[in-house]
Image (cartoon, rainbow, N blue to C red):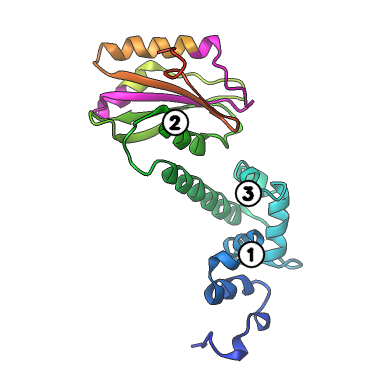
Amino acid sequence: MENFNKPSTSIKNWSADDQPREKLLQKGAASLSNSELLAILINNGSRNKSAVDLAKEVLQLGSNNLNELGKLSVKNLRQVHGIGLAKSIAIAAALELGRRRQAAATLEKPVVKSSKDIAHYLVALLKDFSYEVFAVLFLNQANKINHFEIISRGGITGTIADPRIILKKALEEEATAIVLSHNHPSGNLHPSKADEEITWKIVEAARYFDIKVIDHIIVSEEGYYSFADNGKL
């Protein structure tokens, strides 16, 4: 077995593909650049490029910005020659883990106390979608989050939320309250007439089951809009 502490195992003596892994072992993950961390996910290079070279090209797809990179699909990632399906899936999975960690960090306690708490949680989860999605948080009697689910996915300009699907799921989760949410890929946070109509439709339907709609939050990269905070609930 190799002894990583020996001078002969200096990072510079390792192959280009192995160097990021050994650097992480010797110096810790925080010492690695974004391209080196991506190179570990990519695992190995192609015939003419090292894993680090491929990683740099992947980063360029996202304008060397991790937030922009997080918006790319598996299909987008495969635009880099040498990044196949397996590598693309590994990168997409890692970015999703980072997104979920960020979302969890914004809501340290699983109890909804204000629109601000829940909005920051939802922004982290939904802001990177390039198309509109409608999601619901299902809460128990203590206002603790039991479940989060994307109910429907639409196009760039809209999506359809079926109250029957939402209420069926609420009953399955034994929710006493729900928070509605959807994203605006355009960045515009102002609710449309359709947004207001579907909100009231769900509010009225939920009332028959003693389920309270405590907010409808629209999110984008620009921030969030709360129906409750603006007196629309």
Residue 198 occupies quadrant? top left
Q: Amino acid at mark 1?
A: Glu
Residue at the spot 65% in from the left edge and 71% down from the top edge:
17
Between label 2 and label 3, give the one nearer the viewer.
2
Q: Amino acid at mark 2?
A: Lys
Q: CA distance from mark 1 to mark 3?
A: 13 Å
Kind of element beneath mark 3: helix
Q: Nearer the viewer, residue 58 or 112?
A: 112
Picture layout, residue 115 above or below residue 66: above
Q: Nearer the viewer, residue 224 or 3?
A: 224
Q: Where's residue 117, x and y in %?
A: 41, 34
Picture layout, residue 45 above or below residue 139: below
Sequence order check: which comes first, mark 1 or mark 3? Answer: 1
Q: Which residues are magenta?
A: 168-195
Residue 81 occupies quadrant? bottom right
Sequence order check: which comes first, mark 2 or mark 3? Answer: 3
Residue 180 occupies quadrant? top left
Direction from residue 60 to residue 231 in the image, left or right: left
Kind of element beneath mark 1: helix
**CB atoms at circles 2 and 1 under 8 Å apart?**
no
Q: Residues within 10 Å of mark 1 (few under 14, many from 20)?
A: many
Q: Quadrant of the C terminus?
A: top left
Return the residue at label 1.
36
Return the residue at label 3.
66
Q: CA distance from mark 2 to mark 3?
A: 24 Å
Residue 116: image tag: 2
Residue at the spot 49% in from the left edge and 38% down from the top edge:
125
Q: Where's residue 209, x and y in %?
A: 24, 15
**CB atoms at circles 1 and 3 under 8 Å apart?**
no
Sequence order check: which comes first, mark 2 or mark 1? Answer: 1
Direction from residue 70 to residue 103 in the image, left or right: left
Q: Where's residue 175, x and y in %?
A: 26, 27
